[in-house]
Amino acid sequence: MKIAQNQALLNDQRSNCLSVSMIVPAASYLNFIRKAYDDRGGIEGQRAPLKTKTAIKIRGRMVDDLLHGAVLPPIVIGVVPTSSDEADKLKNEAVNGNIQALVDRLLAVAPAQVAIIDGMQRTTALLEASDKDATRMASHDVRLELWIGENANSLIYRMLVLNSGQVPWDIKRQLETVYTFLLNEIRQRVADVAVYKIEDRNRRTSSGEYQSSIIIEGYFAFTSRKPFVDVKERVAEDFARLDATESAADGTNLERFIEVLRLLAELDKAFSRYAVARGAANEGNARFLEGRDVFSTRAAIIGFVSAAAVSIYGEPGFELDPVQIAANSIDVTNSVMGLITLLDAKMPEEVGTFLELEVLEERLQGRTGGVGDYEREAFYRAFLSLIKHGKGLPSLLPCWRA
């Protein structure tokens, strides 16, 4: 077996990432990763919950082994630099073998996104071992592997590959952790969208607020062009679909998904101008009492995103040429923004009349089985009509009747 001269750097051409291996003191690694997670409530918010006696026992054994000098498998860290220029500088340091300079640059210029791709439990064990005996752990080294990618999509691919086949967590938490980079990209680029996690409040208080798992499910609906998504199946198989050899196409896909989210947030804001007075009577416990109630429903978000995807890319099975797709994307944006401009010119009460929420309420009432699928289909058809007609709509009545 021949040993390669280069022991630190590999270029992953499939996902367009650099893989850099290194050995660092455990204390140095923990300081770096704590700093990276300061803005997101600490590493604790990213851990998978350990509830079984077996899991707790295994964790305790790992901590004990570390205190007795055990060496852990490599911990994999994903890094998305703040800009393509910064990514090039990091790659140049790695290619030239300047690993220390690369690490120094990472510490000096905080990357836009840093996440533990593989090794959350090992990191937790290192933290607990350091809490028990900081002096002993000060001389302990750990092996790291940095994956440096130019965009979120390439690192999502790595996360899916490395996490596939593991014992599944709660499905919402699994989605949140695997798609950390996608969610961060959305937070940074869509100012009107606030993405909150499982631990945050469960009910939104204003337009533009959405739970992370719904956003990710919307991403699945967008890429599949269907309002019906088997989330568990897609998490297991998505890495095959996200073929990083077609990274340019995937990048365009992500750009268009983010634009559709922006449109959704703008439409949500326009609908939300119609609000009822606090404490107003809600006869019959109506679900859709005011404008912001529309996109408080998971089915509405998935329906809008999938309708936009079909309007841009065509129905599943159709493969439109890039020129047609680009033209369709512009048409969708112009149509939705035209309707938003129309709504913004109305008084709040007029917006309420335009929304025809009573008709929507009637459309979704009376179902005893398959309610979720029925509502997704109803919203999907409604938003196909909305995108088609835009500012030409006299009200949303034709949409709710579609």
Image: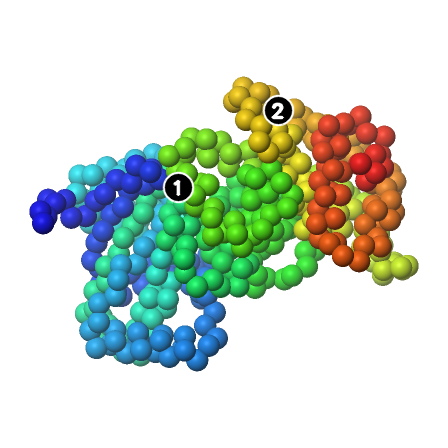
The residue to which callout 1 is attached is: 154
The residue to which callout 2 is attached is: 328
Earlier residue among tags 2 and 1: 1
Q: Is residue 86 left or right of residue 337?
A: left
The type of colouring in the image is rainbow
Q: Is residue 108 left or right of residue 336?
A: left
In depth, the one of 80 and 347 nearer the eye is 80
Percent x, y of residue 161: 38, 50
Q: Is residue 185 left or right of residue 365?
A: left
Could you tell me which secondary element the residue under label 2 belongs to? helix
Q: Which mark is residue 297?
A: none
Crowding at dot 2, Cα within 10 Å, few <14 / some 14-19 / many 20+, comes out as: some
Percent x, y of residue 3: 10, 48
Q: Residue at x 45, y 72 (%)?
A: 50
Label 2 amino acid?
A: Asn
Q: Residue at x 71, y 31 (%)?
A: 387
Instruction: Indicate whether 283 appears above or below 310.
Output: below
**Rounded to the nearest whole Å, what is the CA distance between mark 2 and mark 1?**
26 Å
Percent x, y of residue 318: 58, 28
Crowding at dot 1, Cα within 10 Å, few <14 / some 14-19 / many 20+, comes out as: many
On the question of residue 51 being in view, the answer is yes
Res 136 → quadrant: bottom left
Instruction: Indicate whether 184 appears above or below 385.
Output: below
Percent x, y of residue 108: 31, 49
Q: Residue at x 9, y 49 (%)?
A: 1
Q: Residue furthest left?
A: 2
